[in-house]
Amino acid sequence: MSSLDILIFIAYGLVILLVGNFLHRSKEKENSSSNYFFASNSLPWYLIGTSIIAANISAEQFIGMSGSGYAIGLGIATYEWIAALILIVVAKYFLPILIKNEIYTMPQFMAYRYDNRIKTILAVFWIALFVLVNITSILYLGALTIKILLDIPLIWAIVGLAVFTLLYSVFNGLKAIASTDIIQVFFLVSGGLMTTYLALNATSDGNGIIEGFKIIANEAPEKLHMIIKSSDPNFTYLPGWRAIFGGIWIAGIYYFGANQYIIQKALGAKNLREAQRGMAFAGFLKVLIPLIVVVPGIAAFVLDAKIDTPDGAYPWLLNTFIPSGFKGFIFAALIAAIVSSLSAIINSTSTIFTMDIYKNFFHKTASEKQLVKTGRLSGVLAMIIAASVAPLLGRVEQAFQFIQEFTGMLSPGITAIFILGLFWKKTTSNAAFFGIIISLPASIFLKFVFPAMPFLDKMLCAFLFTSFFMVVWSLLEGRMKTYPKAINVDKRMFKTDRVFNMVSIGIFIMLLALYIVFW
């Protein structure tokens, strides 16, 4: 990177820090746990939508999905495009129940609907997952990219990302994070589009992006299909039509409906209407994301990128085709994606620890000031632990992949108890408790007995088995009676306003057109 690139990147960093601190609340509000963790329920739709995208898109998308675009093609966009529909479903059917019952954390929901056993188990699980998998992997992948571009030691890149994230997020709370995310998403989207333009323009030898698309269609037509055939070696990652209608919905409902650092944005909304519109806006942005993170990887394939692994596609594009000045802006976009995700996960980690563990088990009468202080300290501690573990990922890649797969083994069970808890009044606490326990052996059984089965199919099967187990247990235990802690659901709760409906229909039409063109 040139001096101009570094100057642009430093300017970005200063803007983020200045804006984050400018949005710092008054001392009175600063000591409010409601403001720190949930923005005092004041977030409008546009902050919710951009903050969800900022939390969702990180180095895993820029580096990982570009690599998948290089290796698999446009089919990997299924994860983004189906996510747009899942956001609509969560907004319409899940949010009304959560907001009406004043649910602010997922462990809180587990205690509200079931009991404290499940709440405590999942609170500990989510904290461990966020710190040891999510934050750690984002730090490592982000630092790896910084190491390549700036030629600095990996450990200092990790420390730099950790400190920068803490400076603007851990002291300011959700409102400042969500407000600053507008700037982060601006860098993320504009920088990503710039990379796509320059990559396609390079593909056409300077003849523009339309010509670049034509060349990709002519030279690599196999990369422009959404439906992977069973004969394709990538079928195990995206099993044809089942990738659209199967296990991806289990993963998506867990991620966007029961994942604290995503759903917390919507739960901090002014009201239900703003929350739903915000998630619909996030769904619209998800439709655009493959243009930013997948198409550059396909272009790198056509350009015959000199890389050792597919994940090197995006850094290769930055080093090869991005001119001075633009490189600094795009690098800022990549860092924006990384830091915004880190800040969201740190905030949610501290929220769960403070509200579901510290307040309940260690200090039930804690003051607002003590809760905010605990949230900040737990956020700093989480980052220190993650930063300490992150360098190890370079040496224990297989162990890291195992952790990721282990997470996927548990998500079907969590999704089952979440959905049944919301919509089936007969679900009992014991059914949920043993359901979450039985889901892991079910996933392990599928992994070793059916090793050739695509991972998304395994998730669907594990979800169906766990759900069936819970239904049978609940019927036997409850003798067909409604469980006392069941949530009352009225179909009138799911009525949505015209704006939400129009955006939802627009998203569906766009996705239908995309799948018709690229099926």
Image (cartoon, rainbow, N blue to C red):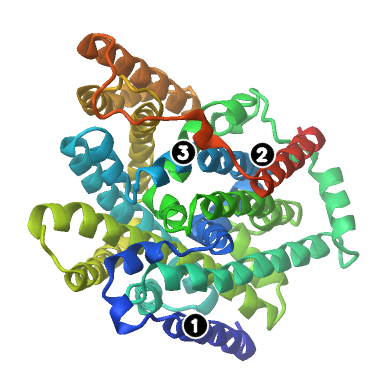
The location of residue 395, given as percent across then percent down, is: 33, 56
Res 342 → quadrant: bottom left
Q: For marks 2 and 3, give the CA distance.
A: 28 Å
In space, the residues marked 1 and 2 are separated at their CA atoms by: 38 Å
Q: Residue at x 35, y 83 (%)?
A: 26
Give SS at disc 2: helix
Which residue is denoted by mark 1 in the rendering? 19
- Whichever of labels 3 and 1 marks the residue nearer the N terminus, that label is 1
Residues 169 and 225: in front is 169
Label 2: few (<14), some or many (≥20) within 10 Å? many
- Give, as a three-letter code, the residue at label 2: Gly
Name the image quarter holding the C terminus: top right
Question: What residue appears at the point 34 percent right and 26 percent down from the top-left corner?
Answer: 443
Dots 2, 3 in contact, CB < 8 A:
no
Which residue was labeled with disc 2? 75
| Quarter of the figure that contains the N terminus | bottom right
Please, what is the three-letter code of the amino acid marked with disc 3? Phe
Disc nearest the viewer among 3 and 1: 3
Amino acid identity at mark 1: Val
347 is higher (above) or lower (below) than 328: above
The residue at which mark 3 appears reads as 94
Badge 3 crowding class, 10 Å Cα cut-off, few under 14, some 14 to 19, many 20 or more, is many
